[in-house]
């Protein structure tokens, strides 16, 4: 669980942070890793659906490290957010970079 903060995981965490805050990536952008740290990317598309005002947009903002909107504003249409998360599965000796496309 503490792999990201370990010396082995810190370079992967640094590639998704900017000034100790999570970087916001566009749909076609990705973290720049040095060739020695190149890892496979696993992509997931996550569609969030539910009643109005339950916190779907706030959840995506919180996971992305962006400020949570203080007041409720209905999301018109679909808002796409791309997050990257490095992880090291227990059964693997090699880290993986998860690319999560949230559709809210």
Image (spheres, rainbow, N blue to C red):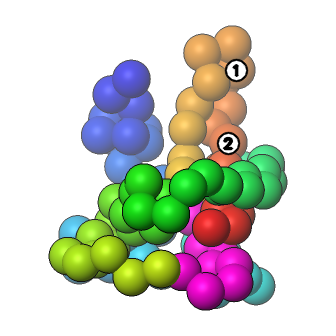
Where residue 62 sits, quadrant-wise, is bottom left
The residue labelled by disc 2 is 96
What residue appears at the point 38 percent right and 40 percent down from the top-left corner? Answer: 4
| Label 2 secondary element | strand
Residue 88 visible within the image: yes
Percent x, y of residue 30: 66, 75
Query: Which quarter of the rendering shows the C terminus?
Result: bottom right
Task: Check if mark 2's residue and mark 1's residue have beta carbons within 8 Å.
Answer: yes
Percent x, y of residue 40: 79, 49
Q: Which residues are magenta?
A: 75-83
The residue labelled by disc 1 is 92
In the image, 91 versus 73, the foreground residue is 73
Neighbour tally class for label 1: few under 14, some 14-19, many 20 plus, Cα within 10 Å: few
Magenta stretch encompasses residue 3: no
| Label 1 secondary element | loop
| Disc number placed over residue 84 in the picture, else none | none
What residue appears at the point 57 percent right and 64 percent down from the top-left corner? Answer: 83
What residue appears at the point 69 percent right and 67 percent down from the top-left corner? Answer: 103
Magenta stretch encompasses residue 82: yes
Neighbour tally class for label 2: few under 14, some 14-19, many 20 plus, Cα within 10 Å: some
In the image, 81 versus 97, the foreground residue is 81
- From the viewer's perspective, tell me whether residue 19 is left or right of residue 18: left
- From the viewer's perspective, tell me whether residue 103 is left or right of residue 10: right
């Amino acid at each position: 669980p503490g792999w990201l903060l370990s010396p082995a995981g810190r370079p992967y965490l640094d590639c998704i942070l900017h000034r100790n805050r999570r970087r916001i990536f566009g749909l076609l952008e990705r973290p720049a890793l040095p060739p020695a740290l190149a890892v496979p990317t696993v992509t997931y598309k996550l569609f969030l659906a539910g009643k109005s005002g339950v916190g779907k947009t706030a959840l995506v903002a919180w996971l992305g490290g962006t400020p949570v909107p203080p007041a409720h504003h209905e999301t018109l249409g679909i808002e796409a957010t791309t997050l990257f998360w490095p992880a090291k599965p227990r059964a693997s000796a090699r880290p993986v970079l998860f690319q999560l496309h949230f559709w809210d």
